[in-house]
Image (tube, rainbow, N blue to C red):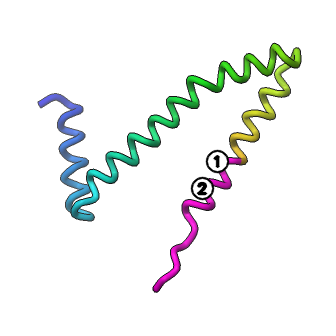
């Protein structure tokens, strides 16, 4: 076995040992997080370049990055809110 196979096997065993049946859900959520991150890393430089060309300076690009940070903070607060106990 190569190193990535060992790591993935260990992660699967650990996930199944902690919460049985959660390994597929963890894989899907991890893949989704990775996909969104890769999309952002591909799109953001183009958006910042477009904003720089449109305005003549990088201030609009910095406002764009700041807006993304603010949206991220709000989403984290929404997703991690405490669950109500029934």
Q: Secondary structure at mark 1?
A: helix
58 vs 22, left or right, is right
The residue at the far bottom in this view is 86
> Image height check: is 40 above or below 54?
below
What percent of the width, then of the height, locates residue 23? 26, 53
Q: Residue at x 43, y 42 (%)?
A: 32
Mark 1 nearby-residue class (10 Å; few <14, some 14–19, many ≥20): few
Alpha carbon distance from label 2 to label 1: 6 Å
50 vs 9, left or right, is right
Mark 2 nearby-residue class (10 Å; few <14, some 14–19, many ≥20): few
- The reply to whether callout 2 and callout 1 are in contact (CB within 8 Å) is yes
8 vs 30, left or right, is left
Tell me the magenta residue range: 71-86
Q: Secondary structure at mark 2?
A: helix
What percent of the width, then of the height, locates residue 30? 39, 44
The residue at the far right in this view is 56
Q: Where's the N terminus, which quadrant?
A: top left
The residue at the far left in this view is 1
Number of residue marks: 2
Q: Residue at x 25, y 48 (%)?
A: 11
Q: Residue at x 39, y 40 (%)?
A: 31
Question: Would residue 65 be counted in the magenta stretch?
Answer: no
Q: Residue at x 23, y 32 (%)?
A: 4
In the foreground, 65 or 32: 32
In the foreground, 48 or 1: 48
What percent of the width, then of the height, locates residue 74? 67, 55
- Per the image, the residue denoted by label 1 is 72
- Per the image, the residue denoted by label 2 is 76
User: Which quadrant of the view contains residue 51?
Assistant: top right
């Amino acid at each position: 076995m190569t190193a990535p196979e060992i790591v993935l096997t260990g992660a699967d065993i650990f996930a199944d040992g902690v919460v049985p049946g959660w390994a597929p859900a963890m894989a899907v959520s991890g893949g989704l997080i990775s996909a969104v991150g890769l999309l952002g890393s591909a799109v953001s430089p183009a958006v910042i370049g477009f904003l720089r060309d449109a305005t003549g300076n990088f201030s609009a690009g910095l406002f764009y990055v700041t807006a993304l940070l603010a949206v991220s903070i709000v989403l984290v607060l929404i997703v991690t809110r405490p669950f109500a106990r029934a």
